[in-house]
Amino acid sequence: MNERPDENFRERVTGSFARQNVMQTIGAELTRVEYGIVEIEMPFRADLTQQHGFLHAGILSTALDSACGYAALSVMPEDAAVLTIEFKINLLSPGRGDRFLFRGEVTKPGSTIIVSDGRGYALTDGPAKLVASMTGTMMVVRGREGIAG
C-alpha cells in the first residue's frame, strides 16, 4: 500500500456506502475512512438480536463484511468497484453492548484480489470488547455492467 492513493477514495467509499441500503436498514454509519482502513458503527437494537438477546451473527457478519470491503475499495483505482468473494468469521464473544464498532483494514493489497481483516467490538461504559474477527477476500471489479464504485 505504498502507492499514492486515489485522491477521491474517501468520496468513492462514502458514496458507495450511502447506496448500500442494508447499512441503513441496520442503522450503521460510516465513522472513519482512511487509506486501507474503514470503521462502521451502529447502536444496539433489539430487533437485530437472536433468541438470547445478543446481536445476531448475521448482523455482525454483514457489518464486518462492509468494513472489510470498503477498506479494500479505498485502495482500489478510481475506475474499480469491490465485491466480496469469500470471508471467514470467528465469533469470539456474545454481541452484547450499547454500540458496536466494526473496523476493516487491508492486509494484502493487489491488482485483482485484496485481503482485508476485520474486528468487531462491543462498546459500553467500560473498555471495548472484541466480539468478532473476520478475514475477507475482495475482488477488484472493472468494466462490468451495473457494477460501479
Image (cartoon, rainbow, N blue to C red):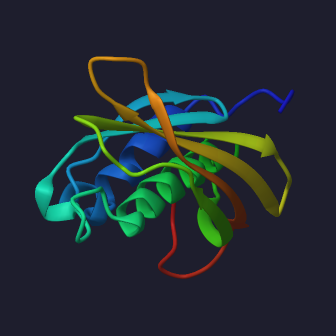
Quarter holding residue 115: bottom right
Viewer-proximal residue, 114 or 135? 135
Quadrant location, the N terminus = top right
Q: Is residue 147 above or below residue 52?
A: below
Disc tally is: 0
Specify whether residue 77 is in view. Answer: no
Direction bottom: furthest residue: 145
Identify the residue at image location x=79%, y=42%: 107
Residue 90 image-quadrant placement: bottom right
Name of the residue lying farthest toward the front: 52
Question: Is 62 situated left or right of 6 in this image?
Answer: left
Is residue 17 left or right of 129 when viewed as pictured?
A: left
Task: Give the residue at x 51% y 65%.
Answer: 148
| Image position of 120 with respect to 52: above or below | above
- Residue 92 in view in this figure: yes
Q: Residue at x 15, y 51 (%)?
A: 45
Viewer-proximal residue among 114 and 91: 91
Q: Residue, x 70% and y 49% (percent of image)?
A: 116
Does residue 59 appear left or right of residue 7 in this picture?
left
Q: On screen, 45 above or below 75?
A: below
Residue 67 pos. (x, y %): 51, 47
Depth check: 4 or 98 in front?
98
- Residue 50, percent from left and from top: 26, 68
- Residue 113's x, y, as percent? 81, 62
